[in-house]
Amino acid sequence: MQPSWTGGDLRFSYCTEHDLPDIARMLAKESVCRWLCFGPNTDEATRSYFLPLIEEMQTAFQEGREPDHHVFTVRLEDTGDFVGQCALFPVDFSPGSFLIGYQLDDTYWKQGYGTLACTFLVYFAFIVLDGYRLNGDTVAGNTASRRVMERCGFVLEGIQRQYWCAGGEYHDRLIFGLLKSDLAPERLSELGETFTAA
Ligand SMILES: CC(C)(COP(=O)(O)OP(=O)(O)OC[C@H]1O[C@@H](n2cnc3c(N)ncnc32)[C@H](O)[C@@H]1OP(=O)(O)O)[C@@H](O)C(=O)NCCC(=O)NCCS
C-alpha cells in the first residue's frame, strides 16, 4: 500500500494509477475547473498529466529516496470515498521551497475539507519534509482558494495584473507565501498532532 497520513476524517495517500479515474472524473467538471487555467479535461489529458508524476514518485520509493513531487489523493478515511487531490511541487533551485495545489470534488465543498487539505500540505512541507517556504497562487475571483490559504496563515505577497487569460477574460493572479518561520512553535506542534502517518 502507498504511504498515507490521516487527519480529521480524511486520508491523504500518495497518488497511484488506481486514483486516476476518480481524479479524471473530478477534472472533467466545469464547476471544479472554473478558476483553473486548465480544463475541463478529457480522461486522456488527466492521465497524461498525472502518469509521469506517479511514475516519478514510484521510482523514488523503489530507490528508497524522497520523490521530487508529492501528489496526494484525498479520501474519507472511513468509506474511502474520493474527495479530491492536493500536491506539493518543488521550486527549481530552491530546496525546501514548494508550490501548493489542491482541487476537491464539488460535492465536498464548504465543509472545511479545502482548509484541512491545505493544512495537511503545510504539515507535510514543514514537518515531514522540513521545508522552509510554501508558495500559492490563485485567480483573484477564486474566493474559496484565497480563503483556504488565508485560513492556513498564508500572506498575500503580490498581485500580477491580468496575468491569466481564460475564457476570453483577463484575470489577476494573487501570489501567496508562507514561511515556516511565520508559524509559532505551538502551531507547528499542533500540526504534528493533527496528522498521523498511517
Ligand atoms: C478551493 C477549494 C479547495 C475550497 O474547498 P472547500 O472545501 O470548499 O473550502 P473550505 O470548506 O475549507 O472553506 C474555506 C473558505 O472558503 C469559503 N468558500 C468555499 N467555497 C466558496 C465559494 N464557492 N465562494 C466563496 N467562498 C467559498 C468558505 O466559506 C471558507 O471561508 P470562511 O473562512 O470565510 O468561512 C474548492 O472550492 C475547490 O476544489 N475548487 C475547485 C478547484 C480550485 O479552484 N482549486 C484551487 C486552485 S488555486
Image (tube, grey):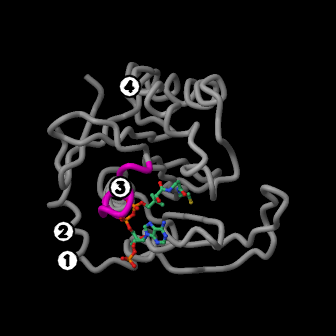
Residue topped by disc 4: 61
Residue at the image position 64 percent from the left and 25 percent from the top: 48
User: Residue 183: x and y, percent?
Assistant: 33, 77
* Residue closer to the observer: 139 or 198: 139
Seen as rendered, the residue at the extreme right is 168
Asked if the residue at tag 2 contacts the one at tag 1, i.e. Cβ–Cβ closer than 8 Å, the answer is yes
Residue topped by disc 2: 189
Hey, what amino acid is under mark 2? Ser
Comes first in the chain, label 1 or label 4: 4
Hey, what amino acid is under mark 4? Phe
Hey, what amino acid is under mark 1? Glu
Q: Any atom of ligand 1 within 8 Å of the CB at mark 4?
A: no
Hey, what amino acid is under mark 3? Ala
Q: Any atom of ligand 1 within 8 Å of the CB at mark 3?
A: yes
Looking at the picture, does residue 50 appear above or below residue 165? above
Comes first in the chain, label 4 or label 3: 4
Residue topped by disc 1: 186
| Secondary structure of residue under mark 4 | helix
| Secondary structure of residue under mark 1 | helix
* Residue closer to the observer: 25 or 4: 25
Circle 1 residues within 10 Å: few <14, some 14–19, many ≥20: few
Magenta segment's dominant SS is helix
Residue topped by disc 3: 117
Q: State which quarter of the image contains the C terminus.
A: top left
Comes first in the chain, label 1 or label 3: 3
Residue at the image position 35 percent from the left and 55 percent from the top: 117
Comes first in the chain, label 2 or label 4: 4
Q: Which residues are magenta?
A: 106-116
